Image: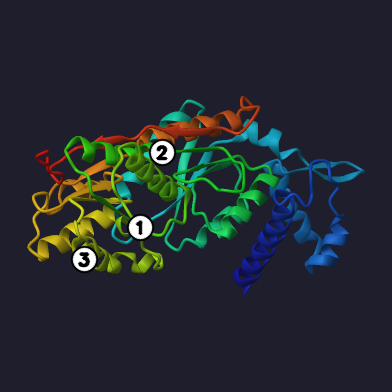
Amino acid sequence: MGDAVNMETQGEHARVQDVIRKRILDGEWGAGFKIPSERDLESELGVSRMTISKGLAPLVAEGLLTRRQGSGTYVNDQSQLRRHRVQWVKMLCATSPNNLRASINHGVLEGAYDALGGYGIHVGVDFYQAMNDQVALLDRPYAPGEGGLLIWFEPLPGNVAALARLRKRGVPFVVLDAYPEDLDVDFAVSDNVAGGALMVQHLVELGHRRVGYLSRPVDRSSLRDRLTGFLQGAVTHQLPYSSDDVVVIRQPRELVLDEVPRVVDHFLALSPRPTAICFSNDELALTAAAYLQQKGIRIPEDVSLVGYDNVEQSKFGPVPLTSVQQDFYGMGKAAGKILGEQLNGAKSGPTSHLFLKPELIVRSSVARLSV
């Protein structure tokens, strides 16, 4: 019985702390705010005054609150406290059951670790699978010693609003991979326009003139910029193309790969048909390669393929895949440097927008055509 009562009391202490911490971190109670008296909190939360007092004690030790004898309990300036007690930051990134992105996450984390290690800050990770889960992670209270976030950005409306709330709370953060269209934030991403143009340039240099492009839904800046780069490359090199040559799959994310065979058949039925197909990521390209192999169509003799991301599996497909490689290590290191400057008060002025140069990794999935 005594253990049960003790557990219940510990739960009440934690509830008191969670309520007060959330009001502070959400900005409802700002720096210098005198919080309600223990008697008022006792009435509001429906717990004993002793429970309120014991719940407040860890928040005082943590530095969120200061007790002033005979005056009351006040909220401290969190930005100043964070600067002096930051021990670690969190990276928020999606994981995938097929683990195609494992090497990407590793590269970003390694770069962030190297950059933030110079500030004595460690990097932790919060993974999620459902894209909407990012909102919950952005809105959660922050633990003692946690200084900010590196965010593999999912451009959903709820996430953009959550970023705005995060900024209002004064939590430092940097986004990676993609950037919000209507909120000015610090970011480090690949120059995907340049990456899309690289695909076209390589194919043109090898004699290709009719080129198809297949993209998953263009629901983020990175994919939009890749398509923009491809189209700019086609214009620059005066390639003949029509709306039939560019296909954007508009199915939900989980159904995209199921559409790849249909789109590949569409390209093969064109007259004249493309001698090469570019893809907005390697997952699409590898799926197309497996389907072409089933149909007895040779890569690259019958059709050439170019992917994007250079994931580990691109080396081991039916034919090793030529692919645009993003500098994920550099992306993580740049983002970590920006976040470190934020946390140490060394960053001022406008937001930082960094675009890292991609590189084309040439393998055997593209044929040279006779001119």
**Disc 1 or 3, which lies upstream in sequence?**
1
C-beta proximity under 8 Å, tags 3 and 2: no
Which amino acid type is marked by label 1? Ser
Disc assigned to residue 265: 3
Query: Which quarter of the image is occupied by the N terminus?
Result: bottom right
Depth check: give the residue in front, 223 or 79: 223
Q: Quadrant of residue 77?
A: top right
Depth check: give the residue in front, 367 or 20: 367
Percent position of residue 99, x then y: 30, 55
Percent position of residue 352, x then y: 56, 32
Which residue carries the number 1 mark?
243
Look at the numbered disc 1 and give the secondary structure of its residue. helix
Residue located 58% across and 35% down the image: 86
Which amino acid type is marked by label 3? Asp
Q: Residues within 10 Å of mark 1 (few under 14, many from 20)?
A: few
Query: Which quarter of the image is occupied by the C terminus?
Result: top left
Mark 1–mark 2 Cα distance, whole angstroms, equals 26 Å
